[in-house]
């Protein structure tokens, strides 16, 4: 399994690979712009060229772009849904420019609407974005903890969205370990992990799983509270992650950590921990 982190773009893309190498990353995820706002600036060609060249030299691959926080592809509010769909289109374009093969997206919150209505809106938004941007970047839908009215805490709901997307070759799944655990999927034990992977395969298909977000959970099983924690220090635990990173059905996948960060030493510690769990 290739390991990496979500890397900050603060100061420009020219600093990303250096930060990734300092953490021992083999794969990375990043935002292509400010994740807490709607406005964005065009990508600057010199910075993009340096980033692409640095990444080629480093061998860091694959690259994942994460959709910003504000878009809500499930929103029943027409204006928010419209700008959310546009945001997805823009990230698909920016991913291609940056050399990323994937965009990771949360499906959003349904607010006061039904789950069926939300699923329809999500699929329609994705279909619109794909029709507007005809590249080969693959969209990865991320499972959620089910906090509030979040959509995507069950594999069955994710399947409903995937089935309603027209171009199925351009969509897959990112499985977040903390979110799954918080949604009630007990992957802290070997038996639980095997059961979850069997359910995932039967419901969605393991061939649609492209990425793992490796995060421990600060909250208990089924809490529906999204709280990431350091590898092995939460409720999933060291043995849970040992099973995950060595599982024959998962060990070929990239694993991106989104663990809490007060300083670089937190990332170094988490990378050391997860690498020590790999059975040689």
Image: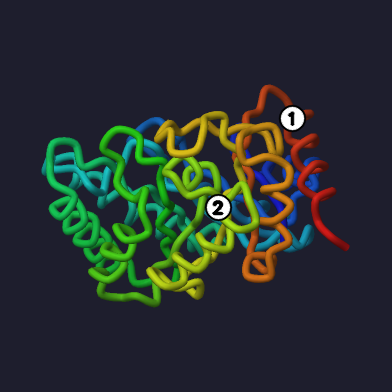
Q: Residues within 10 Å of mark 2 (few under 14, many from 20)?
A: few
Q: Is residue 177 left or right of residue 165?
A: right
Taking 106 as reference, is 36 above or below it?
Answer: above
Displayed quadrant of residue 263: top right
Q: Quadrant of the N terminus?
A: bottom right
Q: Is residue 238 left or right of residue 83?
A: right
Q: Is residue 259 left or right of residue 160?
A: right
Q: Please, which colouring scheme is shown?
A: rainbow
Q: Which residue is mark 1?
A: 266
Q: Earlier in the sequence, mark 1 or mark 2?
A: 2
Q: Residue furthest right?
A: 280
Residue 22 position, x and y percent, is 81, 41
Residue 104 position, x and y percent, is 46, 54
The residue sitting at 67% across, 22% down in the picture is 262
Q: Quadrant of the C terminus?
A: bottom right
Label ID, residue 254 = none
Of residues 206 and 139, the one nearer the viewer is 206
Q: Which residue is mark 2?
A: 45
Taking 231 as reference, is 264 above or below it?
Answer: above
Q: Secondary structure at mark 1?
A: helix
Residue 186 position, x and y percent, is 53, 48
Taking 153 as reference, is 221 above or below it?
Answer: above
Q: Residue furthest front?
A: 191
Residue 130 visible from this viewpoint: yes
Q: Residues within 10 Å of mark 1 (few under 14, many from 20)?
A: some
Residue 50 position, x and y percent, is 67, 52
Badge count: 2
The residue sitting at 79% across, 34% down in the picture is 269
Displayed quadrant of residue 261: top right
Taking 100 as reference, is 105 above or below it?
Answer: above
């Amino acid at each position: 399994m290739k390991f990496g982190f979500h890397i900050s773009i603060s100061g420009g893309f020219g600093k990303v690979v250096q930060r990734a190498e300092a953490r021992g990353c083999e794969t990375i995820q990043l935002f292509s712009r400010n994740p807490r706002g709607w406005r964005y600036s065009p990508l600057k060609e010199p910075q993009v060229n340096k980033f692409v060249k640095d990444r080629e030299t480093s061998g860091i691959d694959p690259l994942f772009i994460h959709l910003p926080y504000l878009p809500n592809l499930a929103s029943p509010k027409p204006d928010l849904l419209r700008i959310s769909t546009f945001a997805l289109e823009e990230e698909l374009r920016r991913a291609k420019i940056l050399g990323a093969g994937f965009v990771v997206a949360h499906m959003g919150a349904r607010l006061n609407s039904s789950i069926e209505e939300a699923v329809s809106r999500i699929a329609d938004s994705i279909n619109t974005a794909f029709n507007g941007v005809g590249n080969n970047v693959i969209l990865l839908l991320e499972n959620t903890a089910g906090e509030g009215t979040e959509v995507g805490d069950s594999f069955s709901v994710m399947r409903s969205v995937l089935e309603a997307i027209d171009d199925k070759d351009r969509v897959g799944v990112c499985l977040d370990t903390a979110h799954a655990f918080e949604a009630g999927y007990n992957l802290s034990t070997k038996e639980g992990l095997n059961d979850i992977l069997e359910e995932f395969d039967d419901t969605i298909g393991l061939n649609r799983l492209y990425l793992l977000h490796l995060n421990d959970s600060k909250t208990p099983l089924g809490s529906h509270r999204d709280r990431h924690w350091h590898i092995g220090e939460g409720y999933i635990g060291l043995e849970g992650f040992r099973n995950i990173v060595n599982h024959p059905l998962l060990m070929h996948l990239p694993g991106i950590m989104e663990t809490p960060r007060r300083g670089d030493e937190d990332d170094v510690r988490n990378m050391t921990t997860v690498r020590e769990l790999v059975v040689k």
